[in-house]
Image: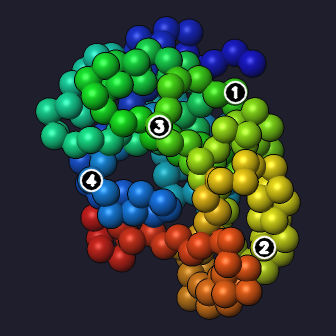
Amino acid sequence: MIKLNSNPNNLPLMEHFYTLQGEGYHTGRAAYFLRLGGCDVGCVWCDVKESWDANKHPQVSIESMAQWVKESGTEMAVITGGEPLMHNLNGLTDCLQNLGIETNIETSGSHPLSGKWNWICVSPKKFKEPLTQVLDQANELKIIIFNKSDFEWAEKYAQLVQPDCKLYLQPEWEQREKVTPLIVDYCKLNPTWRISLQTHKYLQIP
């Protein structure tokens, strides 16, 4: 599968910011986020739909991005989107790791893996199936719960990751009042799962 951008030294960057990781395994850790443009997954409840069209975002050199991360003083960079694996991320992760920065990715897993990663968070979407290759290397599986049927769907993917992969169920933000109690009950009955909350939204930080 061909990557969206044939020049891996420049990538479409929607936004970048230094904040705290708000969800999943690394919740609460300081992290520099690089949100790349481009996505072909098309989640109806996506909260960053403006990221979908890569052509709407400026091409930024990977060296510039790595320098911003380094200057922030953080130990960890999170590459997200959009769907970041639509791009060749080898060069970007090399630049970051050469500067001593941990590289984390948040992906739907729907495109082949590129880049060197300290942590891979796969959040599969029903709109485009994740690849077995990416699921096999996931450190974290994060399933967004929109309704009751999503629990069965979550178990399907829990069977496809490695035994040491961390399993998270996260309420879809607009449905959180309805589904959060369901997730709590499910985790109590199925303790291999943990709940993930979008704490950055509660804290009103980026």
Secondary structure under badge 2? Answer: helix
Give the quarter of the figure containing the C terminus.
bottom left
Q: Earlier in the sequence, mark 3 or mark 1?
A: 1
Q: Earlier in the sequence, mark 3 or mark 2?
A: 3
162 versus 83 height, above or below: below
Instruction: From the top left corner, tell me how far across and down residue 5 is, in percent.
Output: 55, 16
Secondary structure under badge 1? Answer: loop
Res 136 seen here: yes
Secondary structure under badge 4? Answer: strand
In this view of the protein, which residue sits in the foreground, 60 or 73?
Answer: 73
In this view of the protein, which residue sits in the foreground, 168 or 143?
Answer: 168
Tag 3 residue: 118
Mark 4 neighbour density, 10 Å: few (under 14) some (14–19) many (20 or more): some
Mark 3 neighbour density, 10 Å: few (under 14) some (14–19) many (20 or more): some
Instruction: Name the residue: 68% across, 71% down.
Output: 192
Tell me the kind of residue under disc 2.
Phe
Q: CA distance from mark 3 to mark 4?
A: 15 Å
